[in-house]
Structure formats: C-alpha cells, structure tokens
C-alpha cells in the first residue's frame, strides 16, 4: 500500500490543485497565527472598542472594515481563525485516536466482539449524534472550549473506525503479522508496531478529511449559540454575527465567510489529493475510496465479483 | 426477509428506548429546573407546580412513568405551554418534513444526474467543473449560503421572499440552502460509485453489445453504481435534522427544529426528550427503509443475506 516516499510525494505534487490548496491552507494558518502580532505592532487588536467609529467599510486603515463596535475585522478574523483551527486540530486528533483504536480493536478481536462493535457504529451512523451533543451542551450548560472540543471529537470518529477496521482486517492475516505472532509478540504490540503502521495511508486520508468536517461542526454549533462563546470568537461566531447584518454591513459576513470557506475547501482538496497518492487506482476520482458502506453488517457483495 | 425486517425493527425499538433513557438521565442530572425563573413565586406555588409534574417522586418512579408513557406512544406534555408533545410535533413537524423532503429529493435527482454526467465525461473539463462545484457545495456551510442567497436573490434582485413561509415560492431559498451539501455529496458519491462499477464484467458485456457509453451508464451501471448514494441516505436524513435547525433559524420558519432549539434553551424537559426520541425513531425507520432499498437495488446482496440466515 505504501509507496516509497519519493514517488508518493511526486504523485501528490502532480495533483496541482491539492498542492495549491496545501499552500493556501498553510498561508491562512500562518497569517492567523502571526498576523495579530504584526497588527499589534501597528496598533491594531481585536478587542479595542471604538464606539464612535462604529462599523466602517473596508479601507486603508482597516482592510476588512470594522464591526459595529469599531473593532478591526481583519484582526478579528485572524484571531477567529486561530480558535477555529485549534479546535479543529484537537477535535480531529481526538476523533482519530478514538476511531483508530476502536476500529483496530474490533478487527483484531474479530468474531462476535467485532460484530457487536461494528453494529454500534452502524447504529450511530444513522443516529442524530449532533442533536445529542446539542442536548448535552444545552442541559449541562457546558460552554467551555474544552467541552466543545471533546464533544465534537466524540462524535466524529465513526468513519475512521470503519476505515481502520477494514485495513486491519486485510493486514492481520499477512505473513509478517503471522511471523510476529510466531515470535511470541503480544497482540497489543503486534497491533501497534506491525499492523497499524501499514494501515496509515487511508487513515491519514480520512483524518485529513475529518478536519473540514470538524471545523463545520464547530461553526454550526457556534451558529446555534452553543459553540465558541464570547469574548472568544471563531470563524463560525463571526459569520453568525455578520449574517444578521448582511444588508447594512455586508463586509461583516463576506470576509469571515470567504476565509472560512477557503480554508475548508482547501482542506477538502488536500484530503482528495492525499487519497490519490495513497490509492493510485482511484487517482482523479473525488468519489470516496474504500466505500465504508454498511461494513460490519454482513458487508456488501460489491468487491467480491472483481 | 420477514425475519430480517423483524430483527431490524426490534433493534430500532431498543435504540429508541436507549435514547429515551439517556435523555431522561441527562435532563435530570442537569442543573436548573424548568420552573426556575426570575419571577417571584411563593414556595407553595413552586411546590404545587413541581408536584403536578411529579418532580418530587423518586427518580426511578419518574423514569418508570416516563417509559410507560412512551410505550403507549405518549411523548409527554410541555411544561411551558401545557400542550402534548405529540401535538407540537404534529403542528410544527410537517413544515420541517416538507422542507427536508424537498431539499433531499431535489439533491438526489440533480446530484445523481450530475454525478453520472461527470462519470460519463470522466477526466474532461466537464468532470472537473462538476466535481469542483460539488466540493464547493460541500464546503460552504448553510449559514453562509443562506444569508448570501437572501442578500442576492431576495433583497437585491427581489425575486424570492427573504423569510417566513407563505406559498411555494418562499420554500425555494430554504430548500436550496438546506440541499446544497447533499447535492455536492450525492454527485461525488454517484461518480465514485459509477467508476467503481464501470470495470466490472456486466458493464463490459453491455459495452460489447454495442451500446453507447451513455446507455451503458444510464441503463446498466447506474443501478449498481448508485449503491453508495443509498448508503448515504441514512446519515443524510440524520444530517437533515441538524440542517433544519440552521435553515429554520435563518429563514424564521416555525418548524420543529426551531421549536426544539427553543425548548432546549428553556429546559422544557418533556419536549426535549420527546422530540429527541421522535428524531431517533424517525431515523430508525429511515435507516430500515434504506436497508430494504439496498437489497432491492443489488440482487447479489439480497441473496447473500438469505444465504446468511
């Protein structure tokens, strides 16, 4: 599955769109993290309120304009990006950790345990998990960033579990795994040292694709007033504020929306690009690889007739 | 077949009760009761109100009562408005369901067509345009798309009403806003599914008969290639529910989503539990339908299932 590093990099580079998008995302992230420092030196920050100034359209002093309280929108968008990206990275990492261990354990255990574990994943796929976290956040009154990240991570691991399980199922009967077992390696060690590294490709693809998904979830929760809370602001909160003022102060929506849209689009393209590298058979096809399908529930007959 | 359906139904009922139990426990563990307000009330009134809804009974009694009610199909009574939850669902549900069905149906028709065109013209500029468009549709959240559409199409051009529901025309913008994500996803899945199928033997046979590529795709490959789309419908309906929260808020539609979010904020226990259970039951039914449709589309799967019995 894993191609030699050099050839993999070549194939990724051949996908010009993915490379451009990688650049776009890194640039957005770099500007979000470094930008406020530079702006600070120029006397701009996200918190200074200038009620006399109010909302001003984009101009030389404020490139993205100012919001109704006279705060500089460019700096606000950059700070919002820091939070959006941080939330997405940590939540996606949690999702990967849960999904990979869950899928690996299910596949390695096999039999009834595997069946039961994957039936649970099937059930959760058709379950309104987002509604569940809305209920949880609303009734517990949990509004902290930590709770938000943990909850988003806790509902975003399903696809990763399926992908990992499929990979591990394919690998666990291979000779090198048999060899490790014959040498007396314990199951945990076999899984971590021998099986998982070889399953890395597709897992990386879906981990990348989980990032924009998680970012959208955070934005959606922020839109419903349950996500990132003031005084903090993410892209989602900025877009929400802006969308209520779109007629009078369109720049309050347009700039955060463009930046967030660009970041999410870029992440999606990067994910597609990495997939083409990992699974060259599917090169140029933005459909999905591996068809997670209703795996676990008896599976699909599709690939059997190849 | 009957055994399969019965088994799935039993599993669905179990899921619904699990959901009911979970939300019951969650709501009771939560701080703040439904009658905590800034209003000044005498302790006697407070106590009488809480008694009426049995909030002083031991937890297991309250739980038993809630489950017995649910088994009878009774979802409880709103604590804020004194109307049965089932009546609230009957009043606010249809508009949400109509909107969701409209968005999903349009996305399904258009998405499959676009995906098939992209697969037919694969690796050409047509393919690239359709797939880039699909990815953009997936990447733009509804709460960005909605206000932009309102600003452009209704406030600027005056073509369509900006909010509220009054007549068929007012459903257009909400349906587009809600459906864009599904359109993009379904187009991608259709293309991917078709490309998976196009190198199989029965497709080669169809080509060998001298059929045009268009007919091969439309008549032979699509039936099987559409399988990932059918699989996606279950999660799609689940996402439609959270989508309805957003779209109903943007367009000020008095649907079930709006109502649910309001009840969550008001800590109206029975409504939150009742609507959540209703959502879970709705999705269980949809997923069963998806599973059945799956078997109908791919005869090999149906046979495999029967052999497994």
Image (spheres, helix red, strand yellow):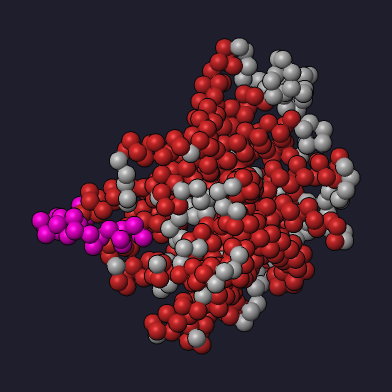
Residue B131 located within the stretch drawn in magenta: no
Q: Main secondary structure of the magenta part?
A: helix
In magenta, the rendered stretch is A165-189
The residue positioned farthest toward the left in the image shown: A183
Farthest residue toward the top? Answer: A42
Left or right of A102 in this view: A27: right
| Residue B273 visible in image | no
Question: Residue B38: x and y, percent?
Answer: 71, 49
Observer-nearest of A229 and B58 = A229
Q: Position of residue A195 (x, y in %)?
A: 26, 53
Tell me which residue sits at (61%, 20%) in the image.
A45
Q: Quadrant of the rendered structure where residue A263 is?
A: top right
Judge left or right: residue A113 versus residue B70: left
Labels in figure, total: 0
Residue B265's x, y, as percent? 66, 53
Q: Residue at x 68, y 31 (%)?
A: A255
Expressed as whole percent of the image width and height from the top left, the position of residue A294 reads: 46, 67
Which quadrant does the C terminus of chain A fall into? Answer: bottom left
């Amino acid at each position: 599955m894993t191609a030699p590093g050099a050839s993999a990099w070549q194939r990724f580079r051949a996908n010009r769109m993915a490379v451009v998008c990688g650049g776009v995302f890194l640039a957005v992230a770099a500007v979000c993290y470094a930008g406020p420092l530079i702006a600070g030196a120029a006397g701009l920050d996200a918190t200074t309120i200038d009620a006399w100034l109010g909302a001003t359209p984009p101009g030389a002093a404020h490139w993205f304009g100012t919001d109704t309280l006279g705060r500089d929108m460019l700096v606000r968008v950059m700070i919002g990006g820091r939070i959006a990206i941080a939330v997405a990275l940590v939540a996606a990492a949690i999702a990967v950790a849960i999904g990979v261990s869950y899928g690996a354990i299910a596949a390695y255990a096999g039999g009834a345990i595997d069946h039961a574990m994957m039936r649970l994943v099937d059930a959760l796929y058709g379950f309104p998990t987002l509604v569940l976290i809305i209920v949880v956040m609303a009734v517990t009154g949990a509004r902290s960033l930590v709770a938000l990240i943990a909850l988003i991570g806790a509902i975003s691991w399903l696809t990763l579990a399926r992908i990992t399980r499929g990979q591990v199922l394919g690998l666990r009967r291979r000779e090198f795994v048999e060899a490790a077992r014959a040498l007396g390696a314990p199951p945990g060690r076999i899984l971590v040292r021998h099986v998982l590294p070889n399953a890395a490709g597709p897992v990386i693809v879906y981990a990348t694709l989980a990032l924009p998904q998680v970012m959208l979830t955070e934005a959606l929760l922020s839109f419903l007033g349950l996500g990132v809370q003031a005084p903090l602001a993410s892209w989602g909160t900025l877009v929400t504020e802006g969308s209520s003022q779109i007629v009078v102060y369109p720049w309050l929506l347009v700039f955060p929306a463009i930046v967030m849209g660009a970041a999410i689009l870029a992440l999606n393209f990067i994910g597609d690009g990495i997939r083409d590298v990992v699974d060259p058979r599917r090169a140029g096809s933005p459909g999905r690889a591996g068809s997670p399908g209703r795996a676990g529930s008896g599976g699909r007959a599709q690939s059997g007739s190849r | 077949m009957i055994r399969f359906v019965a088994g799935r139904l039993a599993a669905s009922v179990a899921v619904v009760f699990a959901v009911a139990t979970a939300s019951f426990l969650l709501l009771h563990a939560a701080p703040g009761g439904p009658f905590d307000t800034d209003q000044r009330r005498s302790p006697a009134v407070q106590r009488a109100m809480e008694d009426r809804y049995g909030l002083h009974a031991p937890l297991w009694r309250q739980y038993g009562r809630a489950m017995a009610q649910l088994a009878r199909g009774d979802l409880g009574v709103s604590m804020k408005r004194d109307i049965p939850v089932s009546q609230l669902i009957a009043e606010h549900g249809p508009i949400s369901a109509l909107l969701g069905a409209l968005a999903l149906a349009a996305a399904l028709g258009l998405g499959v067509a676009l995906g098939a065109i992209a697969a037919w013209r694969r690796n050409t500029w047509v393919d690239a345009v359709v797939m880039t468009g699909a990815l953009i549709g997936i990447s733009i959240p509804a709460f960005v798309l909605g206000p932009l559409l309102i600003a452009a199409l209704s406030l600027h051009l005056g073509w369509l009403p900006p909010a509220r529901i009054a007549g068929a025309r007012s459903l257009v913008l909400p349906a587009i806003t809600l459906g864009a994500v599904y359109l993009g996803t379904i187009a991608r899945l259709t293309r991917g599914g078709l490309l998976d199928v196009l190198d199989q033997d029965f497709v080669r046979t169809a080509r060998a008969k001298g059929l045009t590529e268009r007919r091969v795709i439309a008549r032979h490959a699509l039936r099987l290639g559409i399988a990932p789309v059918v699989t996606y419908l279950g999660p799609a309906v689940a996402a439609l529910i959270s989508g309805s929260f957003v779209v109903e808020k943007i367009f000020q539609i008095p649907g079930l989503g709006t109502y649910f979010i309001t009840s969550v904020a008001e800590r109206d226990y029975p409504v939150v539990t009742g609507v959540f259970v209703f959502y879970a039951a709705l999705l269980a039914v949809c997923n069963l339908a998806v599973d059945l449709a799956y078997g109908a589309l791919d005869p090999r799967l149906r046979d495999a299932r029967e052999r497994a019995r």
